[in-house]
Amino acid sequence: MSRTPELPSARTERLVRERVASEAPGTQLPAVKAWATELHTSRATLGRVLKKLQGEGLIKIVVGWGTFVAESQAPEGR
């Protein structure tokens, strides 16, 4: 059996989720440009992942300030 390679966008999402889960609430995450370079992905791909995680309530993007781990990472409605 051969293993299907992980898509770059899926890899980026997995790595970002791992990082967010490992940080304390309120922690500022790396700047998009630097983080995209670190993850070997495009800023556009990273931006899409960050928007998705913001929609899930895991992070908060503050324009002009940065991206932060959400104060409460518990899914809403639970």
Image: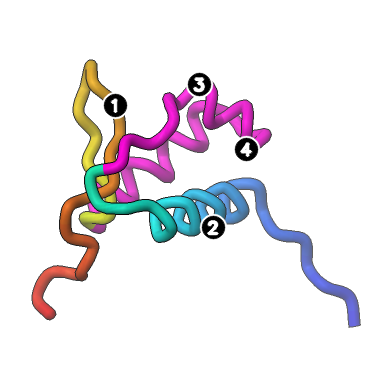
Q: In the image, is residue 66 above or below residue 18? A: above
Q: Is residue 57 magenta?
A: no
Query: In the image, what residue occupies the spot 78% across and 68% down?
Result: 4
Query: In the image, what residue occupies the spot 57% across and 47% down?
Result: 12
Residue 46: image x %, image y %? Answer: 48, 36
Q: Is residue 34 left or right of residue 27?
A: right
Residue 65: image x %, image y %? Answer: 23, 21
Question: 10 Å neighbourhood of mark 3: few (<14), some, or many (≥20)?
Answer: some
Amino acid at circle 4: Leu
**Coloration mode:** rainbow
Secondary element at tag 1? strand
**Disc number placed over residue 14 in the picture, else none:** 2
Question: 10 Å neighbourhood of mark 4: few (<14), some, or many (≥20)?
Answer: some
Question: Principal SS element in the magenta part?
Answer: helix
Instruction: Decide which of tag 2 and tag 3 comes sooner along the chain.
Output: 2
Q: Which residue is mark 3?
A: 33
Query: In the image, what residue occupies the spot 63% across and 32% down?
Result: 38
